[in-house]
Image (spheres, helix red, strand yellow):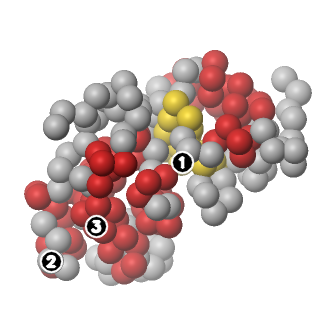
Amino acid sequence: MEEDATMPLTLEERARHVSLKAAIDYLASVCDGACRRDGAGFSGVDVRLGHWLARLPLDAWPDAAFERAWRLAQKYARQLQEAGIDPASLPRPSAARGMHHLAFHPSGEGFMVLFPYNTALIVALRRAFPQARFRQDPVKHFFLPRDPNPGSALLRWACFYEFTLGPGVQAALERPDSKERTE
């Protein structure tokens, strides 16, 4: 079944990627946070995203995360093969799906903005949220605000730049405890 890149993944489509979630979970389970060069788990550049995806249930993964998770599985193919997981058998998600996405971690850990590298968006994001912690790599850019709930400022920013919103994002940003930023 071909995935429609304009519609969010259905539960049935997500179920195709249970083995991908298992691969990410495995890598996170053997990862020490890149404290040692032991060839186990994620390298430093991938630790935060890899562990975030491992803690996040598959049904809450942002659509944009599926392609990135697949790339992680290919990057760590040797480790996965040694654990009995065949990265070549993992179905590849549509790369075009959900390229600009705002996600919320159900644990309350925070928000994540995922998008392909784009200098203008990075500048706009850093200007709007100068206190945010940023991470980036050539495939996507993401950030976790220092403020656990940046409020409607983040919602307005995401809508202005036409980001899709993940499950629970709008409700979380509209909670009474969210902080309103003046712009």
Q: State the residue at coordinates (36%, 48%).
A: 11
Residue in the foreground of this view, choosing between 24 and 175: 175
Q: CA distance from mark 1 to mark 2?
A: 31 Å
Q: Amino acid at mark 2?
A: Gly
Q: Amino acid at mark 1?
A: Arg
Q: Residue 146 vs residue 85: left or right?
A: right
The answer to whether the residue labelled 1 contacts the one labelled 2, judged by CB atoms less than 8 Å apart, is no
Neighbour tally class for label 2: few under 14, some 14-19, many 20 plus, Cα within 10 Å = few
Residue 146 place in picture, x, y as percent: 74, 51
Neighbour tally class for label 3: few under 14, some 14-19, many 20 plus, Cα within 10 Å = many
Q: Residue 23 vs residue 116: left or right?
A: left
Residue 154 place in picture, x, y as percent: 71, 33
On-image quarter of the N terminus: top left
> Element at badge 3?
helix
Q: CA distance from mark 1 to mark 3?
A: 22 Å
Q: Earlier along the polypeptide chain: callout 1 or callout 2?
A: 2
On the question of residue 177 being in view, the answer is yes
Task: Report the residue marked by disc 2.
Answer: 84
Location of residue 153 by image quarter: top right
Between circles 1 and 3, the one closer to the viewer is 3
Q: Amino acid at mark 3?
A: Ala
Point out the residue furthest to the front here: 12
Q: CA distance from mark 3 to mark 2?
A: 10 Å
On-image quarter of the C terminus: top right
Neighbour tally class for label 1: few under 14, some 14-19, many 20 plus, Cα within 10 Å = some
Task: Report the residue marked by disc 1.
Answer: 135
> Element at badge 2?
loop
Q: Earlier along the polypeptide chain: callout 3 or callout 2?
A: 3
Residue in the foreground of this view, choosing between 22 and 147: 22
The answer to whether the residue labelled 1 contacts the one labelled 3, judged by CB atoms less than 8 Å apart, is no
Location of residue 43 by image quarter: bottom left
Task: Report the residue marked by disc 3.
Answer: 23
